[in-house]
Image (spheres, grey):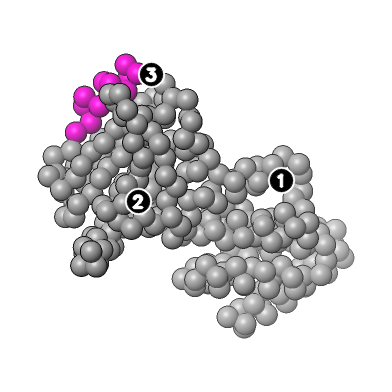
Amino acid sequence: MMRRFLCILLALSFGLSLGAQTGNQDGVYAVLDSLMLNYVGSIQQESQESKQNECGFLINSVKDSLLKQHLAVSLFNYYKDAPVMGDEAVAIWLYDNWFASGKVKFKGEFEALDAEMFCNMNRNSLLGMDAPILLLRKPCLGRREIPAKGRTTLLWFYDTACSKCKVEAKLLPGLLDREVDFPLTVCAVYTGRDKKAWREFRRTFKLGNPRIKLEHYWDPEVSSDYLRLYGVMSTPKMYMVAPEGSIIGRRLEPESLLQLLPTASELDKVFSINQ
């Protein structure tokens, strides 16, 4: 790890010096971004704590303020849209420890506001955290808190007017009916306000696996604060919650959900044994 760090640090120092001499700083930044991507790729399998430490060590070792800023922003943007599920936590750590603290600033006010919003919308639903509890309306009168402990829960936030949601609505029933071999509650949360459209969706969206319990909810007044608690700035959004209440999957799509199901099945067996 240290050897990789020293290599990129030398490249950063050399690149800054070369940029100052040639006046081609934008070109140098492009090269440094490429080196940074190779670096974070090399630690992709490390723990989140290790990634945080590496990022902090790297930023702290760069003395030039402009280069430090560019590197910190590049690392934040990379982990904001992290290729590894759960690594959004690294972006939030970078924001809290480097940007919110004032050690480094974003290049513009809009960029800073966007970063703050991202962190506020994601810090409550990171992997391993207790899933936020939502009090939502049922189709008939009454409300219920979800997710309920005791069963694995799949939270699916969707809108009937969302084209990607329509695709997922066609894929999910077959995938879940075919692959789920453990007790699962699917909480389909409608994020729109068209009661007629929601009723029509409920009529057509069916699951045939007897192990799966399908429940429909909505919150037209957004009184549960689900937008912030689960970062539902767009749809669809999918989370998986273990029986004891911790988040084991976020930013899920059908393919990543399929990959997570064996792990969820094993966690369910462990939970059942310990009851």
In primary-sequence order, the first of circles 1 and 2 is: 1
Number of labels in the image equals 3
- At label 3, the amino acid type is Asp
Percent of width and height locating residue 30: 69, 58
Which residue lies under the disc numbered 2?
Answer: 240
Q: Position of residue 139 (x, y in %)?
A: 29, 25
> Is 213 placed above or below 47 here?
above
Location of the N terminus (image quadrant): bottom right
Height in image: 273 above or below 126?
Answer: below
Residue 91 part of the magenta-drawn span: no
In the rendering, at what x and y percent does residue 179 appear? 19, 52
Q: What residue is at 19 percent from the left and 52 percent from the top? A: 183
Q: In the image shown, does 208 or 83 lie closer to the viewer?
A: 208
Per the picture, the main secondary structure of the magenta-coloured stretch is helix
Chain-order first, disc 2 or disc 3: 3
Q: In the rendered image, which quarter is residue 61 located in?
A: bottom right
Q: Residue furthest bottom?
A: 3
Query: Which region of the structure is painted magenta?
Result: 194-206
Query: Is 195 located above or below residue 240 in the figure?
Result: above
Front position among marks 1 and 2 = 2
Q: Is residue 83 left or right of residue 6?
A: left
Q: Which mark is residue 112?
A: 1
Q: What is the three-letter code of the residue carrying label 2?
A: Met
Disc number placed over residue 194 in the picture, else none: 3
Residue 152 rendering spot, x and y as whole percentages: 28, 52
